[in-house]
Structures are given as C-alpha cells and as structure tokens.
Amino acid sequence: MSLCAGRLLHRQFSTSICLKYPRSMRLRNTSSPALEKETNDNVEFRHFPVMKNEILAFLDPKEDEKFLDMTFGGGGHSRSILKCSPTSQVFALDRDPVAYNIAKTLSINYRDRLHPMLGRFSELDTVAKDIGLQEGILDGVVIDAGCSSMQFDTAERGFALSKSGPLDMRMDGDNRHENQPTAADVVNSLNVETLARIIKAYGEERQAKKIAQLIVEFREKYHPIKTTSELANIVSFAFTHTQSSQSKDMIGRKMHVATRTFQALRIFVNNELEELSNGLNLVSKFLKPGGRIAVLTFHSLEDRIVKRILQGRHAMEPGKSIHQKKRDNFTYNTESGHENQIKIWSFDDKFMEPSEKEVEKNPRSRSAKLRKAVKL
C-alpha cells in the first residue's frame, strides 16, 4: 500500500467510523487517574533518550541557539540540549497531551527557555505561529519517530503487548480529535481485505490475510475485541507453535508474533507515516542555513521516508540501483523529472546505530537508526 493509498484509506475510515460509532461509545481511557497523577505530581518515570550523546555531538548546542524537539515525549533530548548551555532555548512539540503537560511542568524550571507546543507534525505551522516560532531562526531539530516509552509503559494507552489494557493506541488522547478511531474501532469495523492490507503494509506481516480472517471471525462469532491481550491471543492463532517460538524481528531479537500487527494498527490509527513526511517537509523552513536535523527511526517504513526526503526525493519515489546512481553521478537527471528541483539538505546515506553499551542499558534502542542532515 502506498502512502497516498494509505492516506485515502485512513480518511475514508475515519469518516465511516464516526458514523458507525458515536463518540460516547468509543474508548475514553487516555486521561486515566494514573496518567494525571504522573503529570500533575511531576512523578519521575524511567526514561532513556535514545542515542543522546550522538545527537548532542551533532547538534552541538551553543549559547543563545534555538532548537526544536518535534517529539518531546518524556523530555530526555530537550533536557540534554538545555543543559548544554544556560542560554539555549528549546521549542518542545508533541501531539500527546500527557507529554505536553510534562513539558509545561518542566518549563517552570527552564523559564523562557523551554516552550511547550501541543500538536501533530502536520500542525507545525499553526502551533509555531501561536507560540511565536518564526521561520529561519532554528539552529537544530531533533525527531524521535514512533511511539514513546512513556506510551508503551502505560497500559491504559493500549500500545503494548506486554500490558493488558483497552485497545486504544491514540497518541493524541481522546479529546483533541474526536473523529479519530481507536485500534478497537479499526479491528471491529473493517472487512478482511482492508484489515489484511493495513497489517501487511504497515506491519510488513506475511500472515496478514490469516490474521485478518481470525479477527473478523472472532468478533462475529463472539464479541467485539476490546483489549490488547484479546487481540494478541487472537493473532497468535495464526502461527504454529514452532513459528511462535522462532519469531524474531529484523535484527534477530525474540519477538511476540503479534508485534507487527500492533505496529500496523498503531501506524494506521495515528497516520504516522504521513505525519512524518509532513513534518520533514515543513520543518526545513524554520531552520537557518547551516541548521542541523537529527532523526531517529525504529523500523524500515520510517527510515525509508526519512532517507528519501533528506535526499530531496518524494517520500514514495522508488529508489535507484547502484548503476543508476553511477549513471546520474548522484544527481537528479531529466528522466526522473527533478532537473529543476532545489536541493534543501546536505545529506549522505550513512546512518548511525546505538552502541552495544546503550543497547544493553536500553534494549528498546536496538533497532534505532540515526540520520543527520544540514540545511543548505
């Protein structure tokens, strides 16, 4: 499924789900007492910003410089930037109201230096205007794509396989976008063919069709699927015992067989790939010439989009073979239709991975890739 096809499907489904499920029937678990306590009482949680040292070395924060953290989350990268210089500033964007409240609390300690912003990547223009972030003033940007540890570790959010909770997965919570479907809405409403397309495209799951059939069969025979543990159990029936015991991710880690299905639903519910593409295309105008951008990704779908956009290509443009690159001398030729395109980024295809020491300390960092670019 292409990004364009996924965008159309996402919009069509978002509209239909609102007609099928009144808002009062959709899950409302994001503002749980546990989450409010964590935010309001400023309770410390276990948070390890991925590849912090590598990102700091590249951004190289200096006095009076301004940065944008487009995925504030638990604030690890923002804190590290602010600690580098007593006069640096960070504009902290996040679509998650919980993260936004954490940023507001933290801003008390960094008065006039940390500026919380609530919004999606695609809303950057609007929220930047509201807070006074002007074009061409940023010295650096950091993006930590995907789901935050804070979201994974909170059962009420419905992101994690390891914690049974309502099948929600909305990064925005339940109040900001009332038409946004939950993961439960998705699995309880779509037909086999559409579910299979989502699971295959966004989860890169080979058993997508079988999983989709089991989901539809369960909800029709028994009851709507409401929890993460229910869905994980249903998905597991699509695999033999041998397949389950040998299931590994792209880098060889043992993996629950439902992991890819959960990834697919999360990406679809939050429209993550289009948001990432929008964010990368929007942020360049806020950077100064020479401004630096560091982007962390955790799976191939994200990394592919980042690499293509930083290369100056469209997010869905096919890649080139080594022969084509040699022929074009790494520039766009007239056959590709890019002969008049202005190059925005200084970027090479090299990426960095976390050290063995970091992976040992924070296993979730193992699949991370860090790509870096400088605005021309």
Image: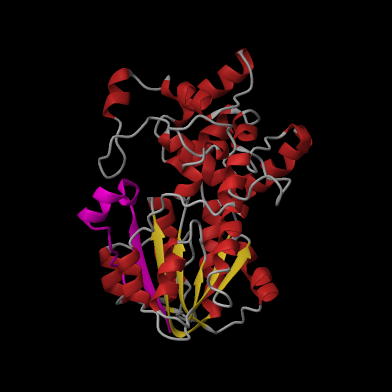
Is 310 on the left-hand or right-hand side of 1? Answer: left
Q: Residue 188's image quarter?
A: top right
In the rendered structure, does residue 349 fall within the stretch colored magenta? yes
Is 366 on the left-hand or right-hand side of 142? Answer: left
The residue lying furthest to the front in this view is 41
Residue plotted at (41% across, 41% down) = 204
The correct choice, above or below, for 40 with respect to 258 in the image is: below
The correct choice, above or below, for 267 with respect to 220 in the image is: below
Residue 213 x %, y %: 52, 23
Is 14 on the left-hand or right-hand side of 259? Answer: right
Residue 108 x %, y %: 58, 68
Viewer can see residue 318: no
The correct choice, above or below, for 350 with respect to 155 in the image is: below
Q: Closer to the camera, 105 or 134?
A: 105
Q: What segment is highlighted magenta in the picture?
A: 348-376
Residue 289 x %, y %: 46, 86
Viewer can see residue 197: yes
Q: Closer to the camera, 199 or 1?
A: 199
Is 336 on the left-hand or right-hand side of 158? Answer: left
Q: How is the image coloured?
A: secondary structure
In the rendered structure, does residue 274 fall within the stretch colored magenta? no
Q: Residue 134's image quarter?
A: bottom right
State the quadrant of the C terminus: bottom left
The residue lying furthest to the top in this view is 221
Residue plotted at (58% across, 78% down) = 112
Residue plotted at (51% across, 40% down) = 154
Residue 216 x %, y %: 58, 22
The correct choice, above or below, for 318 with respect to 238 in the image is: below
Residue plotted at (61% across, 63% down) = 122
Q: How many marks?
A: 0
